[in-house]
Image: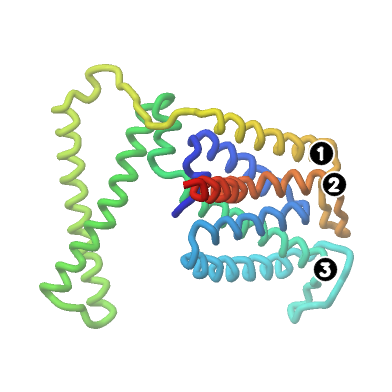
Amino acid sequence: MTDEFSRFHPVVNIIFYMVVLIITMFQMQQVMVIISTVCAIIYHIYLKKQKSVKFCIMAFFIFTSSAVINPLFSHKGATLLFYMFTGNPVTLESIVYGVFAALVIVAMIFWLSTFNEIMTEDKILALIGAIMPSVALLLTMIFRFVSKFTKKIKEISMTHKALKGEPEGFFNKIKSSLHIFSITITWALENSVDTADSMTARGYGCAKRTNYNNYRIEKRDILLSLWMIMLFGVVISRWVAGDLYTYYYPFVRTKGQIMVYVAYILLCVTPMAVNILEGIRWRRLKSKI
């Protein structure tokens, strides 16, 4: 992954995702939902490339199922379309609400997927290490344990297949899987005891812990943070003033402002804009060589 936005200070990254996710989760205005969803999908495709295809297919099924569920259980709304075979009415408002609620879910999935790509373990630990060192240590051990546990269970599974072959039959496969899982759990418990003994031997808990991280706040981090906070302030101010809403029941009514839409678009495309500007800068430097 070549992403200039990920090279910014972790505080800048977390500010971006905080403001975008807050608006995405709590603002159901139709245009805002569409902007968030489209920008999240574009950024996800930029980060994941071909890997994003399967993710988009999965998101489409989530969107379809979520959009269909609401009209089946919610019968509010004044515009009656037809009756189901159960006798329950289906209204236009319930369908519209289901579609945009599904879009919010999809947008959240894509944004969180890009968050997982940008906010690596070391960034998360750098943010909380100085404030909560014990929590940072615990998270470090959890992240390390999950990766080691996954790797170990694959090794044991491959060794088991090499020695005894592929199990045949449904119950034999379950028995084999339980046996592999039991071995891995035993290894995990023994490893935890060894880790505790090692930490004690190295003097853990004898003195106050120090914290180190490799990130330093630069001028560009401050400028980009102020840029995102300013755009977030524009959206929030109009939202609080009542100029940004969509009512779905009993009739669909929506209100918005072009200024707010532009501000939100600029906010959501900030990571992509950073990458585009850095690409232009890099090509300009190469041309001078």
Q: Which mark is residue 92?
A: 3
Report the quarter where the N terminus lies: bottom left
Residue 5 as seen in the image, left or right of residue 89: left
Q: Residue 277's spot in the image, x, y percent?
A: 59, 46
- Cα distance, mark 1 to mark 2? 8 Å
At 49% from the left and 49% from the top, the residue drawn is 286
Q: Which mark is residue 108?
A: none
Amino acid on which the number 1 mark rests in the picture: Arg
Examine the rendering and report whether any part of residue 25 can be seen: no
Q: Residue 142 occupies which quadrant of the picture?
A: top left
Sequence order check, earlier mark of 3 and 1: 3
Residue density around tag 3, few if under 14, some if 14–19, many if 20 or more, within 10 Å: many
Label 3 vs label 1, nearer the camera: 1
Q: Residue 11's spot in the image, x, y percent?
A: 52, 33
Callouts 1 and 2 close, C-beta under 8 Å = yes
Sequence order check, earlier mark of 3 and 2: 3
Q: Give the residue pinned by disc 2.
A: 257
Q: Give the residue pinned by disc 1.
A: 238
Residue density around tag 2, few if under 14, some if 14–19, many if 20 or more, within 10 Å: few
